[in-house]
Amino acid sequence: MAKQPVPKKKTGKSKGRKRYGSFKTKVLKRLSNSLSLRECQNCGAKHRAHHVCKECGQYRGRQVVDKQKKIDKITKIKA
Ligand SMILES: [Zn+2]
């Protein structure tokens, strides 16, 4: 059987937690940079650039998605 690398000492709790903590912050930073959130001109909520605002359904000051209609559709399916 071929030899395989084996760690000399067990990695402690704090060392492992430190490593994964820094990894988590790195990943979160990368995600927030890639999304590039912008503020909505109408309601001021955060939305993705070049995308319709999910809060009010407007894009560049123009009503694109009717939020009231969507709510009606959902209630019909449930009833
Ligand atoms: Zn909005």
Image: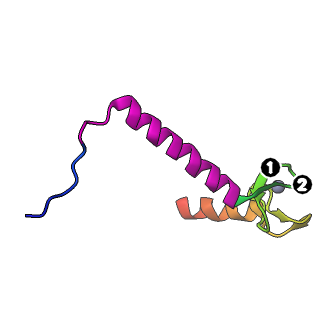
Which region is colored magenta?
8-34
Q: Secondary structure at mark 1?
A: loop
| Residue 19 versus residue 61 in the image, above or below | above
Please name the residue shown 79% across and 62% down the image.
Answer: 57
Report which quarter residue 34 is drawn in. bottom right
Check mark 2 vs ligand 1: CB closer than 8 Å? yes or no: yes
Q: Residue tagged by mark 2?
A: 42
Mark number displayed over residue 35: none
Q: Is the C terminus in the top left, top right, bottom left or bottom right quadrant?
A: bottom right
- Residue type highlighted by circle 2: Asn
In the image, residue 33 sits, relative to residue 77, either above or below, namely above
- Of 46 and 23, the residue lying toward us: 23
Residue named by callout 1 = 45
Asked whether residue 19 is drawn in magenta, I would say yes
Residue 70 as seen in the image, left or right of residue 45:
left
Q: How is the image coloured?
A: rainbow
**Quarter, ligand 1:** bottom right
Task: Tell me the element at label 2.
Answer: loop
**Residue 46, percent across and down?**
77, 51
Q: The N terminus is located in which quarter?
A: bottom left
Q: Relative to 67, is 6 on the left or the right?
A: left
